[in-house]
Image: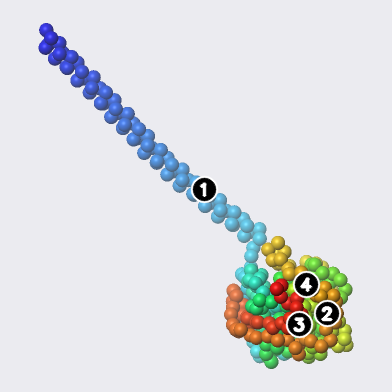
């Protein structure tokens, strides 16, 4: 009886094992199907999402273009030397500069297009201070004047962060006297009556009559106030725009004070000296070296970059250096 019971038990266990094996295979097959089904659904969802986003971006771009159409940037107008409508004079646009490359990338194409639209013959000189002294705007303008060449007969002392947006502004030859383009009633920041900074046009003869600008101003500010006194001392009449109705919206000021801090420190006797008139120094006494001169274009707009090393007499102006 015992052997036969064992056989019966064996025959009874084999079907049970078969059923368990089939159940496991069935479950595995079901899980595998579910896995692939999930992958397929995820793939379909990603395709739908990408198509939906692409369509939405395209639609938004079309709507933006329809609402705010942009003209082709920096249209290039050929300056013909034989075209009398451009006039006989040529402007040296002198830009005292240090480190503000993001502003320069906007300034050069904007000014080239602006002056070309107004048919002003011009060359843009970026006078880049590369020494270790404090920034000296006035000395850099003196250098720009001396290095601008004989093919230009008047200059614009022009800040790199101030862009004119009104085409009615006059950038023509200022035969009657210095012409302050960024006048106090138009400049977005400075509104006092004796202000002559920002953008000032002079003939080269008038600039020489003033002996240029004083080289004593290291750091930011006051050099243009001293130059106002030079204009008056030379007997020149200061002229300003009239009939401009755009007010403080006449210019776009692109300087970010949070990103570019101005050097307004006053060291040693600098605070007292900044209010004095420099009766000796100026264009005749600026000391500098041109380290390099490069002709380049920015978005198709040509300019000349002068890398300049200024010299400082620490006995006369010890505040030229923080050290």
Q: Residues within 10 Å of mark 3 (few under 14, many from 20)?
A: few
Number of labelled discs?
4
Alpha carbons under labels 1 and 3: distance apart: 71 Å
Looking at the image, residue 305 sits to the left or right of residue 20; the answer is: right
Mark 1 or mark 4: name the one nearer the start of the chain.
1
Mark 3 or mark 4: name the one nearer the start of the chain.
4
Per the image, the residue denoted by label 2 is 226
Q: What's the image's color scheme?
A: rainbow
Q: SS for tag 1?
A: helix
Pointer 2 with pointer 3, Cβ within 8 A: no
The residue shown at (34%, 35%) is 32
Looking at the rendering, in which quadrant would you find the C terminus? bottom right
Per the image, the residue denoted by label 3 is 315
Per the image, the residue denoted by label 4 is 267
Looking at the image, residue 50 sits to the left or right of residue 312; the answer is: left
Mark 1 or mark 2: name the one nearer the start of the chain.
1
């Amino acid at each position: 009886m015992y052997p036969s019971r064992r056989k019966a038990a064996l025959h009874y266990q084999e079907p049970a094992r078969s059923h368990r094996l089939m159940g496991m295979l069935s479950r595995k097959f079901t899980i595998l199907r579910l896995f692939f089904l999930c992958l397929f659904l995820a793939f379909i969802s990603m395709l739908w999402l990408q198509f939906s986003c692409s369509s939405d971006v395209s639609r938004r771009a079309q709507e933006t273009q329809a609402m705010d159409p942009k003209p082709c940037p920096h249209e290039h107008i050929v300056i013909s030397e034989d075209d009398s409508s451009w006039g006989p004079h040529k402007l040296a646009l002198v830009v005292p500069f240090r480190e503000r490359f993001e502003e320069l990338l906007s300034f050069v194409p904007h000014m080239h297009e602006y002056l070309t639209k107004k048919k002003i013959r011009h060359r843009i000189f970026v006078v880049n201070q590369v020494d270790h002294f404090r920034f000296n705007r006035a000395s850099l303008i003196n250098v720009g004047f001396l290095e601008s060449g004989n093919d230009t007969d008047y200059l614009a002392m022009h800040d790199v962060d101030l862009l004119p947006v009104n085409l009615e502004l006059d950038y023509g030859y200022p035969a009657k006297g210095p012409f302050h383009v960024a006048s106090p009633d138009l400049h977005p920041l400075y509104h006092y009556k004796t202000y002559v900074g920002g953008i000032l046009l002079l003939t080269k003869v008038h600039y020489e009559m003033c002996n240029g600008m004083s080289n004593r101003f290291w750091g930011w500010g006051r050099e243009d106030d001293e130059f106002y006194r030079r204009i008056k001392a030379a007997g020149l009449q200061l002229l300003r725009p009239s009939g401009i109705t755009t007010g403080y919206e006449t210019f776009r000021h692109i300087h970010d004070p949070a990103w570019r801090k101005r050097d307004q420190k006053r060291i040693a006797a600098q605070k007292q000296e900044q209010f004095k008139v420099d009766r000796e120094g100026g264009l005749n006494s600026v000391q500098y070296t041109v380290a390099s001169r490069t002709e380049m274009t920015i978005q198709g707009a040509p300019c000349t970059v002068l890398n300049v090393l200024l010299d400082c007499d620490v006995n006369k102006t010890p505040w030229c250096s923080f050290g």
